[in-house]
Image (cartoon, rainbow, N blue to C red):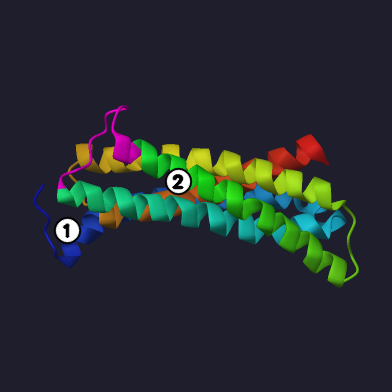
Amino acid sequence: MTTEWTVRAISRAMLPVLLVLTLVEIGSGLVLGSFEGSLLQFPSLLVLVPVTIGTAGNLGSILAARLSTSFHLGTLSFSPTDDELAGNAIATVALAVSAFPLIGAGAWLLTTLLGSTQLALSTVLLVSLTSGVCLAVLAVVVTLVATYAAYRFELDPDDVVLPVVTNTCDVLGVLVLFGAVRLFV
């Protein structure tokens, strides 16, 4: 893969991606707007929205950076038997399993301190953990697909994969959190 480091080349590679991602983010905002009533009724969930979305994007970004580095080093293989790939995916999910209960507990504690707790701690933890683990798995899939697509289209994964992963995780974060709330609240 030859990389051309000019404004024109980077713009030509990124502009279509960014335009599509802008439309995707608008869809995410519309879904979030339809979810507004539940968020206002349960302030703990309102606190979870930005943290859940941000953490999912961060998990995907960490994995994307690791895969991009492996790609540039020539050690990345997209084989299902690749131990490095599997190890990175498992580490991403394990990080979510350890982080999202803390996020849920923090959201519940914050709303308790502000005197507006409506949900039990166990419910907030269940919503947070369930949505976090689902998002971690989805972030792994999105990151692998975006990295592979960058490879196939001979694009630099450093330029393309991170925006795709973070924006997609924003949308998935809203959808998955909304699904977990519908399931458990």
Task: Pick whichever of labels 1 and 2 is earlier in the sequence.
Answer: 1
Q: Which residue lies at the image location 17% right of the left edge and 62% below the top edge? A: 8
Quadrant of the rendered structure where residue 110 is?
bottom right
Is 5 situated left or right of 93 in this image? left
Percent from the top left, x then y, of residue 115? 91, 69
**Residue 18 seen in the current view:** no
Is residue 26 positioned above or below 112 on the image? above
User: What secondary structure characterizes most of the magenta part?
Assistant: loop
Q: Which residue lies at the image location 21% right of the left edge and 36% below the top edge? A: 152
Q: Identity of the amino acid at label 1?
A: Ala
Residue topped by disc 2 = 91
Q: Which residue lies at the image location 78% right of the left edge and 50% below the top edge? A: 124
Quadrant into which the C terminus falls: top right
Q: Which residue lies at the image location 84% right of the left edge and 55% below the top edge? A: 42
Percent from the top left, x then y, of residue 45? 76, 55
- Secondary structure, mark 1, is helix
Residue topped by disc 1 = 9
**Outermost residue toward the top?**
80
Is residue 54 positioned above or below 38 on the image? below
Is residue 5 positioned above or below 12 on the image? below
Q: Range of the magenta residues?
A: 74-85
Instruction: Tell me if mark 1 has few (under 14), some (14-19) or many (20+) residues whose alpha carbon lies within 10 angstroms of its own.
Output: few
User: Cα distance, mark 1 to mark 2?
Assistant: 34 Å
The front one of 14 and 167 is 167
- Within the magenta stretch, is there residue 122? no
Foreground mark, 1 or 2, reads 2
Percent from the top left, x then y, of residue 51? 63, 60
Query: Looking at the rendered structure, which numbered label has been put on residue 145?
Result: none
- Within the magenta stretch, is there residue 83? yes
Q: Identity of the amino acid at label 2?
A: Ala
